[in-house]
Image: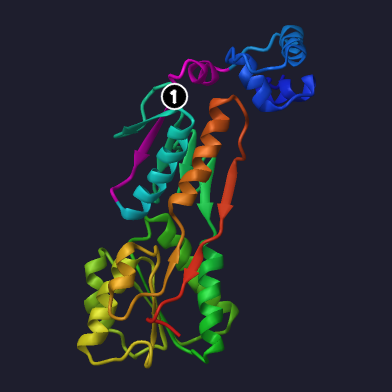
């Protein structure tokens, strides 16, 4: 039998979820008739609020956040989570790893980890409820844009494919090359972003477009091209991925794809609030990534 949530109680009592929440919290600003109706449904159904909801009513609810690293994009998501949850009186506890705590936990990571059972996972699909990004759509937008400028040769530089985003971009790049019948392309998988400088200089031919799986790789690409006297974007276009804060200050400013940001954190916080209130959340949410056009590309 499905476990009842406050959403179910609200539907049966024909009131809003916030009204049920106020009744459970013992708030006085509830119409007596509505309060009686809600209490009667609770009595008839034997409804028992979840442990998360009981903690929330006592202002002791906590959310644990596990970061895979101190990357700017992860911290932007964390900022959105903290700001939204604090507005609702929920404490945020930064954790080093998953433990047996009863509190909901959100993991922000792009590294493949088998059987992660956090309450919410941001960055890649898992057995947990997850928030992921449409990296395939982002890659296709870039390729299709450059084809309109008559680009016919591409290079893709990516980090270790144990990174979910890099893996998805790699497969998306290969599909785009196949679907658009592009035969002139090169792929370089790097152990670390610093290798992008030498990898760029070692490309067999100068492509029309260089795509990078993150902005740090693109930094090395732009430096190598500048040292070789190659003008960007006159001779080729360069795209990063992540839209980190330094993109505006590169020479030329870097076109990049924005995906993890504060707004994503706010979306995650809203999902976590639903968990706290005993509601079900979608198993998988896919968000669009947005291309931010700057002077490194046509």
The vertical placement of 115 against 4, above or below, is: below
Residue in view at x 32 percent, y 33 percent: 95
Query: Which quadrant does the C terminus fall into?
Result: bottom left
In the depicted view, which residue is nearer to us: 5 or 135? 5
Judge whether residue 54 is colored magenta.
Answer: yes
- Was residue 133 drawn as part of the magenta stretch in this picture? no
Left or right: residue 64 compared with residue 120: left
Q: Is residue 28 left or right of residue 87?
A: right
Residue 68 percent location from the top left of the image:
33, 45
Q: Is residue 58 left or right of residue 224?
A: right
**How many other residues sit within 10 Å of disc 1, few (<14), some (14-19) or many (≥20)?**
some
From where the camera sits, is residue 122 visible? yes
Q: Is residue 5 visible?
A: no
Q: Residue at x 49, y 72 (%)?
A: 173
Q: Quadrant of the N terminus?
A: top right
Q: Nearer the viewer, residue 245 or 224?
A: 245
Residue pictured at 70% horizontal, 22% vertical: 2
From what the image shows, is residue 105 above or below residue 59? below
Residue highlighted by disc 1: 103
Residue 254 lies, in percent from the top left, at 36, 75
Q: Residue furthest left?
A: 227
User: Where residue 167 sits: x, y (%)?
Assistant: 43, 61
Q: Residue at x 62, y 28 (%)?
A: 279
Q: The residue tagged with tag 1: helix, strand or loop?
A: loop
Judge whether 244 appears above or below 236 on screen.
above
Q: Quadrant location of residue 106?
A: top left
Q: Nearer the viewer, residue 99 or 242?
A: 242
What residue span does the magenta drawing correspond to?
50-70
Determine the image quadrant of residue 296.
bottom left
């Amino acid at each position: 039998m499905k476990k009842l949530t406050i959403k179910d109680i609200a539907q049966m009592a024909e009131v809003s979820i916030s009204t049920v929440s106020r009744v459970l919290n013992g708030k006085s600003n509830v119409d007596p008739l509505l309060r009686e109706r809600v209490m009667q449904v609770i009595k008839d159904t034997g409804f028992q609020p979840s442990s998360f909801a009981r903690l929330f009513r006592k202002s002791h609810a906590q959310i644990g956040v596990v970061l895979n690293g101190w990357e700017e994009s992860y911290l932007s998501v964390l900022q959105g989570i903290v700001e939204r949850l604090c507005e609702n009186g929920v404490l945020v506890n930064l954790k080093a790893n998953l433990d047996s705590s009863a509190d909901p936990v959100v993991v922000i990571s792009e590294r493949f980890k088998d059987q992660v059972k956090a309450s919410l996972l941001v960055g890649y699909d898992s057995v947990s409820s997850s928030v992921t990004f449409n990296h395939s759509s982002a890659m296709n937008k870039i390729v299709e844009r450059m084809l309109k400028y008559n680009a016919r040769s591409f290079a893709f530089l990516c980090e270790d494919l144990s990174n979910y985003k890099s893996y998805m971009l790699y497969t998306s790049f290969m599909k785009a090359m196949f679907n658009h019948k592009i035969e002139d392309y090169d792929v370089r998988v790097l152990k670390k972003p610093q290798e992008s400088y030498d990898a760029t200089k070692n490309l067999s031919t100068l492509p029309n477009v260089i795509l990078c799986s993150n902005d740090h790789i693109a930094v090395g690409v732009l430096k190598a091209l500048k040292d070789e006297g190659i003008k960007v974007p006159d001779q080729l276009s360069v795209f990063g991925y992540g839209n980190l804060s330094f993109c505006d200050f590169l020479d030329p400013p870097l076109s990049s794809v924005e995906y993890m940001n504060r707004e994503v954190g706010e979306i995650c916080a809203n999902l976590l609030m639903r968990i706290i209130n005993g509601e079900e959340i979608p198993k998988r949410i896919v968000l669009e990534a947005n291309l931010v056009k700057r002077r490194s590309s046509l």
